[in-house]
Amino acid sequence: MKKHNFSAGPCILPQEVFQQASQAVLDFNDSGLSILEISHRSPAFVKVIEEARNLALELLNLQNKGYKALFLQGGASMQFLMTAYNLLNKKAAYLNTGTWSSKAIKEAKLFGEVIEAASSKDKNFNYIPADYSIPEDADYFHCTSNNTIFGTQMKSFPQTEVPVVCDMSSDIFSRVLDFSQFDLIYAGAQKNMGPAGATLVVIKEEILDKVKREIPSMMSYKVHIEKESMFNTPPVYAVYVSLLTLRWLKSRGGISAVEERNAQKAKLVYDEIDRNPLFKGFAAVEDRSAMNATFNLTDESNKDKFDEMWKEANINGLSGHRSVGGYRASMYNALPLESVQVLVDVMQNLEKKA
Ligand SMILES: *Cc1c(COP(=O)(O)O)cnc(C)c1O
């Protein structure tokens, strides 16, 4: 029986994507070949990656605006250093909102000066800093739109003249934004777009070619753009399954439609966290993430009972990250509202029994 999968990542994808993806392993588009055994240079796969790159730009409303989309490998973690390698000449400003931002800062320091514009470390990253300034002479500003581990999400982004780089790994394609306010967006596929192994990078081309250092080919956005994401063998299957998910998203009305469903799911679970005296939210209310809801029990003595109950209800992946503890309900695009209702029912049943 299919579980209610609240896993933070890799995470749930649409059931129909799983079906199409498994069919392609057996016989890709009635070609008599598996998607796993075809050349990445074959016309059939070139079509796949082109459609995926175009669809990503289309869904983000970034077509014909000077942006290129790439599918690279190495995860979002590779982008922590690749962004700095390609963009950091002297100094860059970073907003430190959690584990992933901190890791990005650590990598960037290998390439130049890093200014922490602001940090929410003082409160174990349970909020998004509000008042800070970005030095005008910074090469770029880097932020994390959604903090997967702590359950906070940026609702607005600073207006600045310097290029804005954003790690959107865990909320890409989940809400409508003016994506043209970003100059570089990156996202590991495995949170909201596809299986692990592919990383989407969307770059405004004009920000490249500004650093003095020599960049190794595999690290160079320019090289990957010139080779249309085919400098070396791309992660063929991960790109294909990402394409299936992007098609699914488009067929369901695109980002604005999925944003509405995501808002319903988030409201359902946060209303219960706020109402139920046995639970309390972790993240500051105004910064709560619609993707990852972090919460704790008010009385730890209910832990064993609650853990048993949600597992009994066929729920998977609800335990919080070790740096926060408690629970985390990750509600990515493909998670149905019904799964959130099952969780809320368990929370209410716990209250009746406690
Ligand atoms: C998961 C995650 C990462 C790390 O992604 P990898 O693909 O494992 O390198 C980085 N940033 C955010 C916001 C994430 O959620």
Image (cartoon, rainbow, N blue to C red):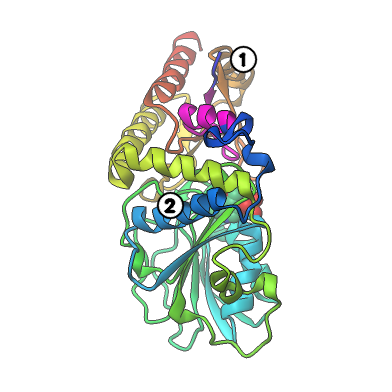
First to last magenta residue range: 4-23
Residue at 69 percent across and 42 percent down: it is 37
Disc 1 from disc 2: Cα separation: 30 Å
**Location of the N terminus (image quadrant):** top right
**Label 2 Cα neighbours within 10 Å, binned few <14 / some 14-19 / many ≥20:** many
Query: Which of these two is toward me, 174 or 241?
Result: 241
Q: Say if residue 220 shows up in the picture.
A: yes
Other-residue count near label 1 (Cα within 10 Å), few / some / many at <14 / 14–19 / ≥20: few
Q: Residue at x 50, y 48 (%)?
A: 170
Asked if 65 appears above or below 146 in the picture, the reply is below
For numbered disc 1, what is the local secondary structure?
Answer: helix
- Residue 131 at what x, y percent from top left? 39, 69
Residue 290 x %, y %: 40, 42
Image height check: is 303 above or below 205? above
Q: Amino acid at mark 1?
A: Glu
Q: Horizontal and vertical percent for residue 269?
A: 39, 30
Where in the figure is residue 306, as x and y percent of width and height?
Answer: 57, 18
Q: Quadrant of residue 218?
A: bottom right
Q: Which mark is residue 153?
A: 2
